[in-house]
Image (cartoon, coloured by chain):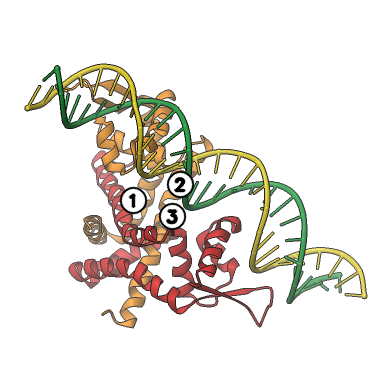
Chain colours: A orange, B red, C green, D yellow
Amino acid sequence: MIKESREQQLREAIELFFFSYRAFTHGPDEILAKRGLGRVHHRILYFVGRQPGLSVNDLLRVLQISKQALNPPLRQLLSMELVRNEQSKADRRVRELRLTPSGKRLEARLTGTQILQLENVFQDQGKKSEKAWKQIMQQLSED
Amino acid sequence: MIKESREQQLREAIELFFFSYRAFTHGPDEILAKRGLGRVHHRILYFVGRQPGLSVNDLLRVLQISKQALNPPLRQLLSMELVRNEQSKADRRVRELRLTPSGKRLEARLTGTQILQLENVFQDQGKKSEKAWKQIMQQLSED
DNA sequence: AGTATGGGTCAATATGGTTGACTATAAATT
DNA sequence: AATTTATAGTCAACCATATTGACCCATACT
């Protein structure tokens, strides 16, 4: 059992998680909305940028959505020439995804708002707090 | 400008935020899915439980969705008798929302998974880390 | 040759959100 | 007392995002 007073502290944390995540996604969401894109587009751009040459299957595993759900936004990014799609030499079934120069620019803009937010907070709260935050988030991710 | 190496550290943080939030909402989502409910239902139950007597307008402000989007899930919770809806004595236009006993039980189950996750992490990482995490999340929320 | 894998697409369906328009009721203002 | 504003609720049209199931094609593996 968890004590009443302790529960209140944990409920505070739940709310902070909710509100901070919303604030964290707000910047990119606004930029995306102007171009008729959504959060999935950002995620694609983000992970393709992070790991150039990523396969479609890899991307599906990271995003944990069905390939039918991935297909439309991915096709859109391909036709907008923000993402490139090349046959892998090693295994010609596999498509290696990469950002184009303009894809890189958009990704940088989108992720830039989040990088700024984090840089500000970590600067204010200090290196030790940053470490503590990351360790907590790391452990939560593993659940 | 942000240095290349610093940017990598911040991108790590972005990913941790993404993955941990997904892990954090996974528990309640599973329980909800079994009853044909969604994340909004949890949010309603959560905030009504947190602030009994909350008005519909208050709820809209917290959730930041349109009243048309709130209406269906709220009606569902009312008809399932998980939430009660009483005219306020002070201002009879206002409906005061409260959880019923079974609403409280469901809310406790849903939020319980998150409380456990947080309690485990905070226990492992210590009180100082918990404070640091909360301060960072607080500052992020204010953006 | 036969099976498994990676990728793509279609259809049907569900959910969750939007905006706009409108109603009913109650409170506040003039 | 009449008008305006505020709270709540509902209908309709629309759109985005997701699901599952059924297929297909090309390539690789056994």
Residue bearing mark 1: A119
The 10 Å Cα crowd at callout 2, few under 14, some 14 to 19, many 20 or more, is some
Q: Is residue B28 visible?
A: yes
Residue A61 drawn above or below residue B84: above
Point out residue B73 in the picture as x, y percentages from the top left corner. Answer: 52, 61
Of badges 1 and 3, nearer the viewer stands: 3
Front-most of residues D25 and C29: D25
Callout 1, which amino acid?
A: Glu
| Residue lying at 30% horizontally and 64% vertically, measured from the top left | B133
Point out the frontmost of discs 3 and 2: 3
The reply, left or right, for residue D21 in relation to residue B52 is left
- Name the residue tied to disc 3: A22
Q: Is residue B142 above or below residue B3?
A: below
Percent of width and height locating residue B56: 59, 68
The residue indicated by pointer 2 is: A27
The earlier-in-sequence mark between 1 and 2 is 2
Q: Residues within 10 Å of mark 1 (few under 14, many from 20)?
A: some
Residue B116's tag is none
Mark 1 falls within which chain? A
- Residue appearing at x 55%, y 77% in the figure: B53
Query: Tag 3, which chain?
Result: A
Tell me the distance, in whole angstroms, between the alpha carbons under discs 1 and 3. 17 Å
Residue at screen point 37% across, 71% down: A11
Q: Residue at x 53, y 58 (%)?
A: B64
Task: Determine the CA span between mark 3 and mark 2.
Answer: 10 Å
Instruction: Establish whether labels 1 and 2 are both on one chain.
Output: yes
Residue A11 vs residue B45: left or right? left
Q: Are marks 1 and 3 on the same chain?
A: yes
